[in-house]
Image (cartoon, grey):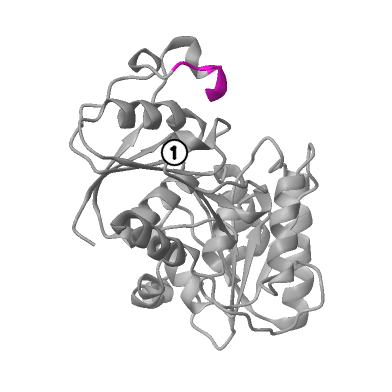
Amino acid sequence: MTKLKGILLTQGMHGMISQVEGLAKALEIEFTHHKVELNNFWNLLPPKFTPVSQNVYKKLNHLDFDIIISCGRKSVIPSIHLKSISNKKVFNIHIQDPKVDLNHFDFVIAPEHDGIKGSNVISTKGAIHYLTKNEIEENKNYLNSFIKRDDRKIWSLILGGPTKYYDYSTKNMKHIFSIFYKLLKKHNFQLVVIPSMRTPLNTIHYAKEFFGENHTIIMNVDKKAYLSALGLSENIVVTCDSSSMISEAALTGKPIYVANILPKRNDKRFQNFRNLFRELNIIRNLGEEIENWNYEKLDETNRVAKILKSKIQS
């Protein structure tokens, strides 16, 4: 595929950045990333009630592109508008359900559990992302200077953060940490706790206080530490609020346990995602019997990129 130029449009959240950048890298395009900002009350309205106009969003001073990759509600109208005013053929790709007529886009990339159908829809098992097997391997030993040097095997707890569905209250965190406490007494592993951009600072400090000096709590967001944890761990635990990080962990082929939090509201979409990953033999719930299992490493980003390259070239 000829080296094409792309612009990436998101609201700036880690999960969205991971998806658009992951796809752009897999497509092997040159790209620049733009955080979308909507003007005035357009920020409050869903895309289906919003006009396709420059007045809706703050102008992006970048017009030389062949591909637009967007993710998230706020990027829907800018993607459609920028394609419409281009003086050359532009492909626009939206990740997740845009909540508008799908024909506004050349391609829509959506998780299978969302149930979106259309001739231009490419369904994925979980979320696409920007991690690669090579990156994990290259950074595998990064945590060696952090972890306690002994013979214990390593388990990693990857923390997400509070959402409108899940609360990171002390009660909820204590419940998860208490399950780990019982497992630690039985299996004697070293726990490495990895925070994400959404993890509250008080949750990180509580983890350090709860598990003490005999385990490793990474206090700051550190992508290399995250990659290293995925590479070093015998088992990986991810909080239920992050479908993106569960999908990223599935790139390793290692057992993944989901640390569940009682939802504040109907979380059927997340449940559908986890049910699919359980059917694929990727996940179990934290608290179930500890076992070792294998599954085919999930690399949806490169699978989708191959389909898109073929369609764009033709």
Q: Quadrant of the C terminus?
A: bottom left
Horizontal and vertical percent for residue 56? 40, 16
The residue lying toward the viewer, choosing from 238 and 33, is: 33
The residue at 50%/48% (across/down) is 120
Q: Quadrant of the N terminus?
A: bottom left
State the image quarter where residue 24 is shown.
Answer: bottom left
Q: Is residue 131 visible?
A: no
Look at the image and give the residue range highlighted in magenta.
44-51
Q: Given the image, on which type of amino acid does mark 1 rest?
A: Phe
Q: Is residue 33 visible?
A: yes
Horizontal and vertical percent for residue 98? 53, 35
Asked whether 48 falls inside the magenta stretch, the response is yes
The residue at 78%/43% (across/down) is 263
Asked whether 145 falls inside the magenta stretch, the response is no
Q: Main secondary structure of the magenta part?
A: loop
The residue at 68%/35% (across/down) is 164
Horizontal and vertical percent for residue 254? 59, 78
Q: Which residue is mark 1?
A: 105
Mark 1 secondary-structure assignment? loop
State the image quarter where residue 244 is shown.
Answer: bottom right
The residue lying toward the viewer, choosing from 75 and 286, is: 75
Neighbours of disc 1 within 10 Å: few (<14), some (14-19), many (20+):
many
The residue furthest bottom is 151
Where 69 falls versus 111 (above or below)? Answer: above
The residue lying toward the viewer, choosing from 46 and 167, is: 46
Q: Is residue 27 left or right of residue 289?
A: left
